[in-house]
């Protein structure tokens, strides 16, 4: 069995942003040389997510509005976590959107359903943060 590991770094210019990282995961898969197996992609930070959904801008703005209804950023004072930090909303948003995805690899490709793409969801950005890619198989 082969095993591949890589860290991808992101630094968004704004606090919240969704990035389509599918092209970089495809690069990792090519680099791994693995044709049959599993690909795990996870955020390495507790205020960011990795999730699979549609690459459609209307949906992305719906996510932003929906998450702000569930866990509004402000006022910061509404959260017990915000003593030394102001990112309680980001922890909550990350929990809703998930930590990781696992995608099957078949014949050297990510075995997606229709319209599936992999996204990095940043909820407390403007600093360098990592995504882990682990691919196992043969
Ligand atoms: Zn925090």
Image (cartoon, rainbow, N blue to C red):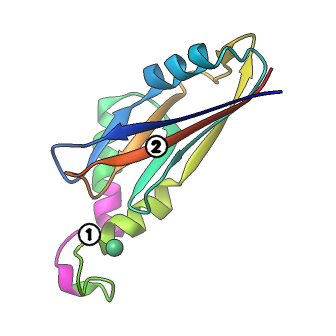
* Percent x, y of residue 137: 79, 26
Q: Which residue is mark 1?
A: 72
Q: Quadrant of residue 46?
A: bottom left
Q: Reply above or below: 10 against 85.
A: above
Pick the front one: 84 or 48: 84
Q: Residue at x 26, y 83 (%)?
A: 82
Q: Is residue 74 magenta?
A: yes
Q: Are marks 2 and 1 in contact (CB under 8 Å)?
A: no
Q: Quadrant of ligand 1?
A: bottom left
In this picture, residue 137 sits left or right of residue 5: right
User: What range of the chain is rendered magenta?
Assistant: 66-77
* Percent x, y of residue 21: 42, 29
Element assignment for label 1: loop
In this picture, residue 27 sits left or right of residue 40: left
- Mark 2 packing: few (<14 Cα in 10 Å), some, or many (20+)? many
Q: Residue at x 43, y 58 (%)?
A: 45
Q: Residue at x 44, y 19 (%)?
A: 23
Q: Quadrant of residue 13?
A: top left
Q: Reply above or below: 76 against 97.
A: below
In this picture, residue 109 sits left or right of residue 97: right
Q: Is residue 5 magenta?
A: no
Which numbered disc, 2 or 1, marks the residue that appears first in the sequence?
1
Q: Reply above or below: 8 against 45.
A: above
Pick the front one: 79 or 30: 30
Element assignment for label 2: strand
* Percent x, y of residue 6: 53, 34
* Percent x, y of residue 40: 64, 39
Q: Which residue is mark 2?
A: 131
- Mark 1 packing: few (<14 Cα in 10 Å), some, or many (20+)? some
């Amino acid at each position: 069995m082969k095993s591949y590991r890589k860290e991808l770094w992101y630094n968004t210019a704004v606090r919240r942003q969704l990035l389509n990282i599918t092209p970089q995961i495809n690069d990792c898969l090519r680099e791994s040389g693995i044709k049959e197996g599993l690909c795990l992609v996870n955020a390495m930070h507790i205020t960011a997510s990795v999730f699979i959904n549609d690459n459609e801008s209307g949906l992305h703005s719906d996510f932003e509005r929906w998450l702000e209804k569930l866990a509004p950023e402000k006022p910061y004072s509404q959260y017990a976590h915000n003593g030394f930090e102001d990112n309680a909303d980001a922890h909550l948003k990350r929990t809703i959107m998930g930590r990781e995805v696992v995608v099957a690899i078949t014949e050297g490709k990510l075995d997606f359903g229709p319209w599936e793409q992999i996204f990095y969801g940043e909820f407390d950005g403007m600093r360098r943060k990592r995504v882990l890619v682990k691919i196992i198989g043969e």
